[in-house]
């Protein structure tokens, strides 16, 4: 007899462990099965323990705070994320009132009571207060959990940190259903074994129709999808694996999959657990961190314990000249002029936890060199295990060049002192007495060399900077590190102040002993003023936009409205916040024509006098002519369309009235011409009649003459 363990998800949501026995039976019909399954008993204690440990491992792996609450509102269990977000240890949390850890205890209490009353709540907003006062805004998804007889034991609640938009992945049904991200489990054969509601929504296919089908069938690139989960089985996990899900109605959703194998208690791989992050919404904290990393101008890199590069940002690609995919997996130390020193550096980080200002020189593939200072520290997983090193390189090539220039010879320094008129170059000793003063300093500060040399350099600083310790910190840093730079307020002889960009270097004697400082500064007041004017110009431009009586709108490449002015709000009758993010074409009598219009702009660069009719939410219509063109970022990349609508309703009405007037005048002209023609005809007719009368008279006279002649004859 063979035994098979199963877990049935009953209709009431209870997970019930069963074991089936398979026994052979004699059959007469060859088409009948020669074995039968019959339920035997509840799973053994070890099997239940295994399931409990599996669920516990998923709970502890979650980055979201998870908590269970008794019917009395007491905390019965928490995970490590809850400890982190409250700052309170597990043993001190358990047994306390759940509502004690929120800014609104009554609301928190009302929340879990709703769960006991209704069975679940979703996206319940609360704010957790850390013991040090820090606040974390969260959305709770919570549901009751039951024993095997269906009796409610308590509430299981998961908090999603909406400041970072993190979604934890949990396999247990209640956790999976709480997730807004599509989650799926896949068998070694590539078949879907379970999904959550988010997967149902993104595919448009019911759960029972998804389960048992091929995972790869629901993507635009089935081969790539199949290759993805096979990589997980081969390598253990994949991160940020890009795929596009196709909804049954044809809609597409771009996602990044993070997936890993999950195992039983003996370590046997059972399948793949995959979480899809909708990258169109940018809701994952890892993506936010990635955008920050890519925004950094400093080269950033992560290094494995074996010294291999695991990730880089674009700045690292630029400084080495090597693409990301060719950097990843190679030895970190290969890209420096001193590989041994580079290797020693990251080993120090693994040994000590961090290093600061570790000097190295990066060699570009074309031979160019970049001097950098590395700040690096280890990063860990949720259990505190060191995963690798995160290192940031600050380019100090220019700073080192300046330091070398100032330390080469006294003659070179004197040349700078004499020739520089824009930059103030001031030498002072360790006691801050001014020793040298160049022409640029005279022009910037107003002191002659003979009246300033020998005085304390504090005369050039504001009393506020001296009192706050900013000056001391600046010189202390220069003394310790050899260089410091920043922006400071400076004071002229006449008492006026200006903003200067300041670089202070430590001056050493031939033996390398510090003997003073060299301060180089540049008046950047004009730049600050330019920045201010630029800001004012931007504000002025905005005020002009808002002052415009014409509806103005910006549209992204997907046809969504990204900004509007007050005139657009008035002509549509829709508030700004309701307009932004909606489809531009929704507000016209001819949506397809409106859509074709902005697509023409993206294709051609602009359109002029494009006729449309805006439909207000009350049904009234406004005829407009759109003039639109694309707008770009500083690199020339098209960001969207800027469109201005000119209301031609009155113009069209006037044109209609003019056309009607013109038609009436033309009709009157035709009628007058007809009358004139009739008058000409009448005159002609009258003339004929007069002629006939004259002829008749002549005939009569002739007759009379003839008659008068006859008698004579």
Image (cartoon, grey):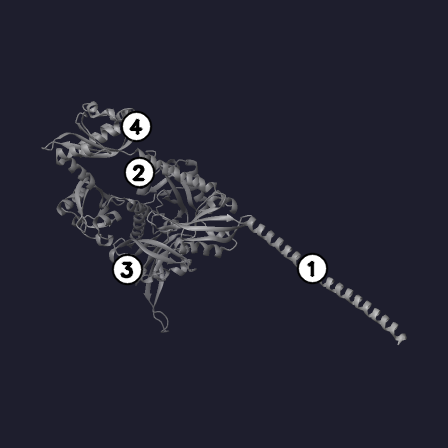
Quadrant into which the N terminus falls: bottom left
SS under mark 1: helix
N-terminal of the two: label 2 or label 3?
A: 2
The reply, left or right, for residue 241 in relation to residue 391 is: right
Q: Position of residue 95 (x, y in %)?
A: 35, 38
If the image is split into quadrants, where does the C terminus sit?
A: bottom right
Q: Which residue is mark 2?
A: 91
On the rendered structure, is 376 left or right of 585? left
Q: CA distance from mark 2 to mark 1?
A: 112 Å
Local SS, label 3: helix
Q: What is the number of the mark on residue 230?
A: 3
Which is nearer the eye, 16 or 357?
357
The nearer-to-camera label among 3 and 1 is 1
Q: Nearer the viewer, mark 2 or mark 1?
A: 1
Decide which of tag 2 and tag 4 comes sooner along the chain.
Answer: 2
Residue carrying label 4: 497
């Amino acid at each position: 007899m063979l035994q098979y363990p199963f877990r049935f998800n009953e209709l009431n949501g209870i997970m019930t462990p069963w074991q089936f026995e398979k026994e052979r039976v004699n059959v007469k019909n060859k088409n009948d099965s020669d074995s039968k399954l019959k339920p035997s008993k509840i799973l053994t204690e070890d099997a239940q323990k295994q399931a409990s440990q599996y669920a516990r491992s998923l709970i502890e792996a979650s980055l979201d705070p998870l908590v269970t609450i008794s019917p009395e509102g007491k905390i019965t269990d928490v995970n490590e994320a809850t400890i982190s977000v409250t700052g309170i240890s597990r043993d001190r949390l358990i047994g306390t009132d759940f509502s004690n850890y929120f800014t609104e205890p009554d609301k928190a209490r009302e929340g879990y009571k709703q769960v006991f009353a209704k069975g679940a709540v979703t996206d319940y907003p609360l704010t957790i207060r850390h013991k040090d006062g820090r606040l974390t805004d969260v959305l709770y998804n919570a549901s009751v959990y039951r024993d095997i007889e269906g009796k409610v034991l308590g509430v299981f609640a998961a908090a999603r940190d909406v400041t970072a938009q993190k979604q934890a992945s949990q396999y247990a049904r209640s956790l999976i259903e709480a997730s807004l991200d599509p989650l799926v489990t896949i068998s070694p054969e590539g078949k879907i074994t379970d999904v959550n509601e988010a997967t149902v929504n993104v595919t448009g296919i019911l759960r029972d129709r998804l389960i048992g089908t091929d995972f790869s069938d629901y993507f635009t690139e089935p081969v790539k999808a199949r290759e993805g989960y096979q990589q997980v089985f081969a390598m253990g996990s994949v991160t940020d694996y890009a795929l596009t899900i196709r909804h049954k109605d044809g809609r597409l959703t771009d996602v990044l999959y993070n997936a890993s194998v999950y195992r039983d208690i003996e370590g046997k791989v059972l399948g793949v657990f995959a979480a899809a992050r909708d990258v169109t919404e940018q809701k994952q904290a890892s993506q936010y961190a990635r955008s920050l990393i890519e925004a950094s101008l400093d080269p950033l890199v992560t290094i494995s314990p074996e010294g291999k590069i695991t990730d880089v940002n674009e700045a690292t690609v630029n400084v080495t000249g090597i693409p990301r995919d060719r950097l990843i997996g190679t030895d970190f130390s290969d890209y420096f002029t001193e590989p041994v020193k580079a290797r020693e550096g990251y080993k120090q980080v693994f040994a000590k936890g961090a290093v600061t200002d570790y000097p190295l020189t990066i060699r570009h593939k074309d031979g160019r060199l970049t001097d950098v200072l590395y700040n690096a520290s280890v990063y860990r997983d949720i259990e505190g295990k060191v995963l690798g090193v995160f290192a940031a390189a600050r380019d100090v090539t220019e700073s080192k060049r300046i330091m070398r220039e100032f330390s080469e010879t006294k003659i070179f320094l004197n040349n700078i002192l004499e020739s520089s008129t824009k930059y103030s170059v001031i030498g002072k000793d360790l006691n801050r007495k001014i020793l040298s003063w160049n022409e640029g300093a005279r022009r910037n500060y107003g002191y002659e060399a003979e009246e300033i040399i020998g005085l304390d350099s504090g005369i050039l600083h504001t009393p506020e900077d001296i009192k706050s310790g900013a000056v001391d910190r600046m010189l202390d840093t220069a003394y310790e590190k050899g260089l410091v730079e920043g922006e400071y307020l400076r004071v002229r002889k006449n008492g006026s102040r200006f903003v200067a960009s300041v670089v202070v270097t430590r001056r050493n004697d031939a033996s390398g002993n510090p003997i003073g400082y060299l301060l180089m500064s540049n008046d950047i007041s004009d730049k600050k003023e330019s920045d201010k004017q630029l800001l004012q110009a931007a504000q002025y431009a905005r005020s002009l936009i808002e002052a415009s009586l014409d509806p103005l709108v910006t549209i992204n490449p997907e046809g969504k409205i990204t900004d509007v002015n007050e005139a657009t709000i008035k002509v549509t009758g829709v508030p700004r916040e309701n307009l932004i993010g909606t489809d531009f074409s929704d507000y016209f009598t001819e949506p397809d024509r409106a859509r074709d219009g902005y697509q023409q702009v993206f294709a051609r660069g602009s359109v002029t006098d494009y006729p449309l009719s805006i439909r207000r939410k009350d049904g009234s219509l406004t005829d407009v002519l759109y003039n639109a063109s694309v707008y770009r970022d500083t690199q020339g990349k098209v960001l969207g369309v800027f469109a201005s609508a000119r209301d031609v309703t009155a113009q069209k009405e006037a044109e209609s009235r003019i056309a009607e007037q013109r038609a009436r005048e033309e009709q009157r002209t035709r009628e007058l011409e007809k009358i004139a023609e009739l008058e000409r005809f009448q005159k002609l007719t009258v003339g004929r009649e007069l002629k006939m009368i004259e002829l008749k008279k002549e005939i009569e006279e002739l007759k009379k003459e003839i008659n008068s002649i006859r008698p004579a004859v």
